[in-house]
Amino acid sequence: MVREPRQERSRTTRRRLVDAAVACLGELGWTGTTVGVIAERAGVSRGAAQHHFPTREELVVAAVEFLADEQIAELRRRAAELPQGPSRAYPVARMLLDLYTGPKFRAALHLWVAASTDEALRRVLAPLETRVGREAHRVALELLGADESRPGVRETVQATLDLARGLGLASLLTDDTRRRERLARQWATFLEPVVGGAGD
């Protein structure tokens, strides 16, 4: 049997640990997500997990970075298929309002709540969340083709992301798919004037 090169095995193990951390956070919350539980879910020893991530906080930070990178990459893939001009506003609104839903958002939310009372977690999570928020803002501008130097554009994009987070919270308890659809269509009317090329 051909063995994987050491570097590739290491990368595979890290990815399994990160995937397991995301799943555990979504299902068990911060309290139930221990290094031992993550290692068991990933199918590796606790020692191997701690070799890659010496602390639970480091593993969780890696998981958040992975979640953010996955979401941004998915947005860009989907955006490449969208039309240009004002008609782009609705599909982009829908994509952005869906950004904070599902198991990935649930995992991140558990971390935010835990970090509000856990100083060690907050120290590592706050700077990362700031970076992730900036990247989400940058990508929203990119998807809309919006010029942030125009008055009101920055605030409109930020309000879009804040609305998306709020809808993500609402979706944790009930299925708000139909309401989200109505809001996306309405919100697109606010986004149309900031879409690249609109009003030029």
Image (cartoon, rainbow, N blue to C red):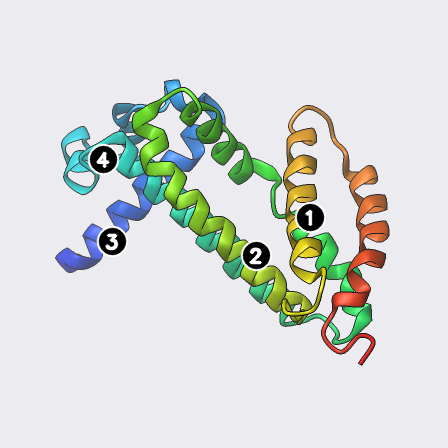
Callout 3 secondary element: helix
Name the N-terminal-most of marks 4 and 2: 4
Earlier-in-chain disc, 2 versus 3: 3
In this rendering, position of residue 174 left or right of residue 138: right
Q: Name the residue under label 3.
A: 11
Examine the rendered structure and indicate whether residue 19 appears above or below residue 30. below
Q: Going from the N terminus, do you reach mark 3 or mark 1 first? A: 3
Q: Residue sitting at 75 percent across and 66 percent down?
A: 194
Q: Give the Cα distance between marks 3 and 1.
A: 38 Å
Q: Mark 1 points at which residue?
A: 159
Q: Name the residue under label 4.
A: 44
The mark found on residue 137 in the picture is 2
Q: Of tags 4 and 3, which is closer to the observer?
A: 3
Q: Tell us which disc is closer to us: 2 or 3.
A: 2
User: Earlier along the polypeptide chain: callout 4 or callout 3?
Assistant: 3
Image marks 3 and 1: residues in contact by CB distance under 8 Å:
no
Q: Which amino acid does label 1 sit on?
A: Ala
